[in-house]
Structure formats: structure tokens, C-alpha cells
Image (spheres, rainbow, N blue to C red):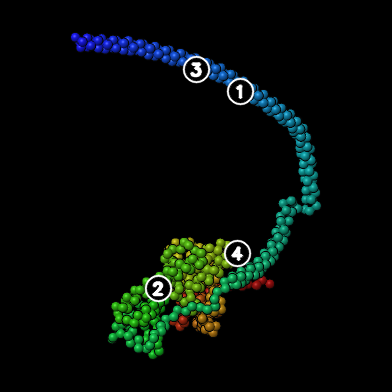
Amino acid sequence: MFATTTIFVAVICIAAGLALGFLVSRQLAAAAQKRQEQEAEDIVAGAKRQAETIKLQAETFKRQVEVEAKDEALKLRAEIEQERKERQSEVRAAENRVAQREESLDRRTESLDSREHQLSSMQGQVEKRQRDLEAAEAEVGKRLVAVAGMTPDEAKEELLDSLRDEVAHESAAIIRDSESRTKAEADKRARNILSLAIQRLAADHTVENTVSTIHIPSDELKGRIIGREGRSIRAFEQLTGTNLIIDDTPECVTISCFEPVRREIGKVTMENLIADGRIHPARIEEMHNKAEALVNQRVREAGEQAVFDVGIHDLHPELVKTLGKLRYRTSYGQNVLNHSLEVSYLCGMMASELGLDPIPARRAGLLHDVGKAIDRELEGSHAVLGADLARRFGEKEHIVHAIEAHHNDVEPNSVLDVLVQAADAVSAARPGARKETLDAYVKRLEKLEEIASSYDGVERTYAIQAGREVRVMVEPEKVDEAKTVVLAHDIASRIENELQYPGQVKVVVIRESRAIGLAK
């Protein structure tokens, strides 16, 4: 019973506790809800206050913007008003200037009108005086005709005749005097230019010779050069196109060939064989190929160096190669490539002294003897061959003509032609340039004149151009026009058969008839 009561009491207590807890939770929930409502009202009130603040700020900013816009409009209006005033002042100033110019033009117009009236008046006076003068001249002419007894045309013709004779006499005297002065001045100027060019050249007096004699260590090597039954020497001569001369001269062999480049290739081949010591046909062929490549390279380098030295950079490669072959060509002991360089320098110097362009002059001087590189292979003079070669490789006509005319194969027709002739003569005639002695030179000229004078009908002979030309004067009574051709051919053939000379000799037969009458 007691236990049941206890449990009942406990249940009642628990129920009371739960009821009390429920009531407390209800009160807490009500209080929390009330707090939330109060917070919401506070948030709404804050938002309203913030909205009112923003609204007030917006209205304040709007009023401020309106004030600033009104100020800016006032400033712009003031600036526009100021600019308008300035424009108005400028317009008034321009109107004043225009008005002043109009006044000035009006004054000038009035002045011109007055001058025009004056000129009209003066023109009338001049015309009146001119009529009076013409009448006076006519009266004077009538009186002169009456006094002189001839018409004005006859008097004019007589006066012109007398003046014509006097002027012709004076002009002839002036022409003769001018010609003499010009010739003297030209000779003086030419000597001065030549002397300056010679002084500035400063070339060496020694000459380079093409040596074809090769030194060997001992005479025992000659047998190895000849080879068994002569096979080695035959192979050498066949490959190089030269003649190998082995005689009793101690410790040397000689290579003979009219073509200088082939002779140089043979010389290099033999020197390499002697240095190597192995001499047989196969080795000879190998050494010949190497020597040919080496000499061709030297030829090309010599041509390129010569072109570079004179300052020419657009020469055709074939012309450069042909020019390099002149390194191994000599004329009277003078190296032709060195001679060509000297002529080029001299032409450039003399052209500069004359106020001409030195580049074409140096070009023509360098190429003037290029035909000597091929004159052993083709028929004709080296001047004509060189001109044909230059023309074939695109050289200009005035350069080609200067090459062809430097030995008078054609007539010189420009200053460049004469410059090349003069420079060629200076380079060949300087002391030490050529080996031909004076006695041999004089004898050759005498022999040329002697051969030409030996023919019947020849009156006088002259060997000129350093023995390159013979001029033969014949008697017109004994030699007619047809015989002159035969005589020139006969003299040329005899010179060719009896004399030895460089280049070619030109034979010119001149037949002249003159009729002279004397009036006493």
C-alpha cells in the first residue's frame, strides 16, 4: 500500500514537473517570439531610417549637381560671350583692313588713270616726231642720191662689199692667230699632263721575264726525265704540248713553247716531278693535272687582282681570266700584265688632269692589250683580236674602239682613243721597260725603209709608230692606182719573210697627183 502510494506520488510529481516544464517552455517561447518581433520591428525601423537617410542624401546630391550644372552653364555662357566679343573685334579689324586696302586701290587706280592720260599724250607726241623724222630721212636720202649719183640699194651693196672684204681679211688673221696660240697651248698642256702622269706613276725599272729553264739537282736526273726508250719525255711533251730540250748544259733542262700558259704549266709540272723524284708516264699525267689546276688558279687570281687594283668591279669573268693570262706573256721582255696596269694608271691620271671621268680611261687602258693573250691562237693583230673579244663579252663601244685604235688599226675618233695611245707609248718607252736595244731598233726601222725603197717608182718611205707602220710615197707617173695595191702587198710579204718583229706592220702606199699653175 505504501509502495503504491509512493508510486502514485511520484507519478503526480512527474506530471507536475512536466506541466511546470511545459508552462515554462511556453513562457520562454512567448518571450523569444516577443524578442524576435521586437528585433524585426527594430530592423524595419532601422531600414526606414536608412532609407530616409539615403533619400535625404540623394536629394542633397541632386541639389548639388543642379547647382554645379548651373555654374558650368554660366561659365560656358561667359566663355561663349567672350569668344563672340573677340570674333566681333577680329571682324571689325578685318573690315578696317579691307577698307584701307580699298582706299589704297582707289588711290592707285587714280594714279594709273593719270599716268595713262600722260602716256597717251606722250605717244601722240612721239608719233608726230617719228613722222617728222621719217620725212627728214626721206629728204636727206633724196639729197644723198642727188650728191652721190647712186641709188640707196647701190650704195648699200657697195658698203657691204667693202665690209665683207675687210671682215674676211681680219677673220683669216684672227683664225691663224687663234690656231697658232691654241696649238702652242695644247702642246704645252699635253707635255704638262704627260710629265705629271709619268712622275706620279713611279713604276719599277726592272722587268719580269718568263723563265723556261729549270734547274735540276744533278745531271743523273736527265736520264730519268728521258725514261726508258724515251717514254717519259714523250709522255711529258704530249701532255703539256711543249718541247723539252735536254742538252749538255749542266744541271738544267729547257722547256720551249710559243704559248706562255702551256709553257708555265710544263714548267710547274717538271718542277713538281723533280721535287717528287718519281718520273714515269702515270706520275707525269698526275702532276700535269695538278699543275694545270694550279696555273689556272694563278691566272684567275692574277686577273682578279689586276681588276681590283685599277678599281673595276663589273668585268666579265672570261675577260678577267683572259687578262690573267697576260701574267705569263712578255713583249720585248716587258711583262704584258704589268704593262697593262701601267697604261691603266696613266690613262686614269691623264683623264683626271683633263677633267674627264677616269673610270672608262682606266678600263680601256687595262684591256688595250688583252688580245695578246690569244694572238698566238688566232690570226690578226692583237688590237683587233682584243677589240673583238671585248665586244663579244659586252664592253661598251667606246672602250672597244679605244682598244682597236691604240695601234691605229682604225682611226682614233675620241679623246679616250688618244689617251690610250699616249699611255701605251709612255709605258713602253720608259727606261728599263723593254729589252730591245737602240741599235736593234734603229736597224729594224732602217731595214723597213730599205725594203720599201727598193721597189721601182717609190719616191720616199717613212717608218713610223715605232716600226708598226710604213708609209710609202710613190711617183704618180710610174705607179698607177692598180699598182699601189700590188705594191703594198709585195712590200708586206717581203717584210713578213725577211724581218722579225712583234705584232704586225702596216704598209700604207700613198699616190698623190698635183697640178700647179702660176698666174703672173
The residue at which mark 2 appears reads as 295
Q: Amino acid at mark 1?
A: Leu
Q: Specify whether residue 115 is in view.
A: yes
Q: Amino acid at mark 2?
A: Val
The nearer-to-camera label among 2 and 3 is 3
Give SS at disc 2: helix
Q: Position of residue 149 (x, y in %)?
A: 77, 53
Q: CA distance from mark 4 to mark 1?
A: 79 Å
What quarter of the picture does the C terminus occupy? bottom right
Horizontal relation, residue 206 to residue 30: left or right: right
Q: CA distance from mark 2 to mark 3?
A: 106 Å
Query: Dot 4, how many residues are within 10 Å of its Cα: few (below 14), some (14-19), or many (20+)?
Result: some
Query: Dot 1, how many residues are within 10 Å of its Cα: few (below 14), some (14-19), or many (20+)?
Result: few
Labels 4 & 1 near each other (Cβ < 8 A): no
The nearer-to-camera label among 3 and 4 is 3
Q: Specify whether residue 401 is in view.
A: no
- The mark that comes first in sequence, 3 or 1, is 3
Q: Nearer the viewer, residue 446 or 79?
A: 79
Give SS at disc 1: helix
Q: CA distance from mark 3 to mark 1?
A: 32 Å
Q: Position of residue 228 (x, y in %)?
A: 28, 86
The residue at which mark 3 appears reads as 54
What quarter of the picture does the N terminus occupy? top left
Q: CA distance from mark 1 to mark 2?
A: 95 Å
Horizontal relation, residue 349 to residue 231: left or right: right
- Residue at position x 32%, y 75% in the image: 286
Tag of residue 354 = 4
Query: Dot 2, how many residues are within 10 Å of its Cα: few (below 14), some (14-19), or many (20+)?
Result: some
Labels 3 & 1 near each other (Cβ < 8 A): no
